[in-house]
Image: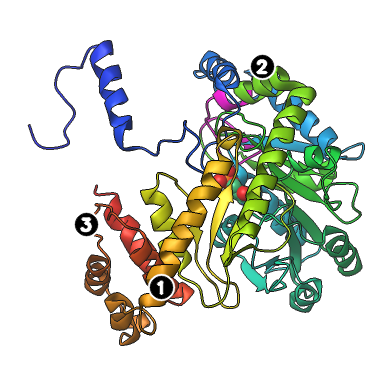
């Protein structure tokens, strides 16, 4: 039998299920609360409700909401909950999608088609702050639109409204602001962006993928939360993920519009082929009913009081981290985070955040390094979720430890550390870099084929030393090799 071929006789149920259990061995261990990001876990009971509801509707198909009426009901119900949560006016609408990326693609597509059909713009562009999620670049890439990137303030990391105004022209379809931004957890000046959008006659999307659900709870708990939802004049659409801080199984987000006339431009219909008539509100066509049913179930299971209680714990735990970080000499919190997303910065002259991150890995934690970009320094990102609650005092102790060790090693080094890969890169013309050069570079920092190295620091340091187009080039080649078939 050749490698990779389908086995001739199928395995038994028990055999394949236990084999699958085995495959989990090398995955990120998130249940103990030592890992940040990726998983938003509100407890075993919430997880069970989500899983059961998901399995009940696993086989149903969201392809045609006129056939599976249950799915249309779930879609409508979770959109309605989202609209009320975000103070949408009468007549506002929305759709359930598979995640933030799909919600954003839908919003950008609606804006593009609105600009073309209603405003007669042949080549509409979007204007985003540099802190806007990569999904906007992806949407512009897929939809073949120009994506204009404005700088943000280098101390607050909030969108610079003047810089965005400067990039806005007669071909601009959409402005974007985040509430909150993933990297630093800050809220962009949405009210001012709304005013700019109204002045220029363009649309404004608020990316509430990660903050849309949680921020109103933080506000109710006394947190500072600037207005960001439909109550702000000029905001025309919002994306909000239920699979983040609403703790629904993955594959759950909504894209919301101030009115149905705008959402009209999101919908795709095709009567121009010989098969069944295709009408898709979102990007996906055939899709499992699982995520919709699960989102409906989890939202109704946890309820408003439950979410408020979960938010209270998260808020307290986040404050422990903020105070803890500020108490460590040499570290600081970047900007003024409004929710449970933090970027930990290293004071000038200190060690590399990538080394601190590697030392934290040694101590059993999993943090998320963020690369530098021009004037915005590299840092360590934390997305704090309920499974981390109760662990953050230990985290701060270990962070202080890791920082001290990194600082000690750093101060012993004479001059900047020598990175052979970065040195090689300096002598390379990025535009001529080929697959061979990339594989050589990756070998220098410990990446061999698709195997991951023990330390990620050297890789991050290498990437950090490259211009962004070279980073994209190397990362694309790396993924092309990672998926070995
Ligand atoms: C997570 C996130 C997205 C993308 O969402 P996915 O569900 O990963 O596709 C977009 N914007 C922000 C601010 C996010 O945090």
**Residue drawn where x is 69% and y is 34% of the image:** 313
Badge 3 is on which residue?
Answer: 449
Disc assigned to residue 75: none
Quarter of the picture holding the N terminus: top left
Q: Quadrant of residue 425?
A: bottom left
Assess whether residue 288 is covered by the magenta stretch: yes
Residue 414 locus on image (x, y percent) = 35, 83
**Prevalent SS, magenta region:** loop
55 on left or right of 162: left
Report helix, strand or loop for mark 1. helix
Residue 183 locus on image (x, y percent) = 61, 58
Q: Quadrant of residue 17?
A: top left
How many other residues sit within 10 Å of disc 2, few (<14), some (14-19) or many (≥20)? some
Report helix, strand or loop for mark 2. helix
In this picture, which residue range is highlighted in magenta? 275-292
User: In this rendering, is residue 40 above or below 266?
Assistant: above
Residue closer to the observer: 106 or 357: 357
Q: Are marks 1 and 3 in contact (CB under 8 Å)?
A: no
Spatial distance from mark 1 to mark 3, Cα to Cα?
30 Å
Badge 2 is on which residue?
Answer: 70
Please count the marks in the image. Answer: 3
């Amino acid at each position: 039998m050749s490698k990779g071929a389908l086995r001739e006789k199928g395995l038994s149920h028990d055999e394949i299920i236990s084999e699958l259990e085995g495959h989990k061995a090398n995955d990120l261990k998130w249940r103990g609360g030592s890992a940040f990001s990726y998983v938003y876990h509100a407890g075993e009971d919430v997880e069970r409700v989500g899983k059961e509801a998901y399995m009940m509707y696993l086989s149903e198909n969201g392809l045609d909401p006129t056939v599976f009426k249950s799915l249309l009901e779930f879609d409508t119900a979770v959109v309605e909950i989202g609209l009320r949560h975000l103070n949408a006016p009468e007549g506002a609408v929305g759709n359930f999608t598979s995640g933030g990326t799909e919600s954003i693609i839908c919003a950008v597509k609606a804006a593009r088609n609105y600009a073309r059909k209603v405003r007669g713009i042949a080549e509409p562009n979007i204007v985003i702050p540099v802190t806007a999620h990569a999904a906007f670049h992806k949407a512009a890439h897929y939809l073949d639109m120009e994506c204009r990137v404005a700088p943000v303030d280098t101390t607050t990391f909030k969108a610079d409204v003047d810089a965005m105004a400067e990039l806005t022209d007669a071909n601009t379809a959409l402005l974007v602001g985040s509430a909150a931004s993933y990297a630093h957890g800050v809220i962009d000046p949405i009210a001012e962006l709304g005013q700019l959008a109204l002045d220029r006659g363009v649309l404004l999307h608020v990316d509430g993928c990660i903050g849309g659900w949680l921020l109103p709870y933080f506000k109710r708990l006394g947190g500072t939360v600037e207005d960001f939802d439909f109550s702000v004049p000029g905001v025309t659409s919002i994306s909000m993920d239920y699979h983040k801080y609403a703790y629904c199984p993955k594959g759950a987000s909504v894209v919301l519009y101030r009115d149905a006339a705008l959402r009209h431009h999101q919908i795709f219909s095709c009567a121009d082929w010989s098969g069944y008539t295709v009408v898709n509100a979102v990007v996906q066509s055939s899709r499992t009913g699982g995520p919709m049913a699960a989102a409906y179930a989890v939202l109704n299971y946890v309820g408003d009081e439950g979410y408020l209680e979960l938010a209270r714990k998260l808020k307290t735990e986040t404050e422990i981290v903020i105070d803890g970080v500020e108490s460590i000499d040499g570290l600081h919190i970047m900007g003024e985070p409004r929710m449970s997303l933090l970027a930990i910065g290293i004071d000038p002259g200190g060690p590399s955040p990538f080394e601190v991150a590697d030392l934290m890995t040694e101590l059993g934690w999993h943090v998320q390094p963020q690369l530098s970009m021009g004037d915005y320094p590299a840092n360590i990102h934390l997305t704090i979720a309920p499974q981390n609650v109760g662990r953050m005092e230990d985290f701060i102790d270990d962070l202080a430890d890791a920082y001290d060790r990194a600082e000690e090693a750093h101060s012993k080094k004479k001059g900047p550390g020598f990175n052979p890969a970065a040195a090689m890169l300096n002598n390379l013309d990025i535009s001529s870099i080929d697959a061979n050069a990339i594989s050589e570079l990756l070998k220098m920092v410990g990446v061999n084929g698709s195997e991951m190295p023990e330390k990620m620091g050297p890789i991050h340091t290498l990437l950090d030393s490259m211009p962004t187009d070279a980073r994209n080039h190397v990362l694309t080649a790396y993924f092309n090799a990672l998926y070995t078939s």
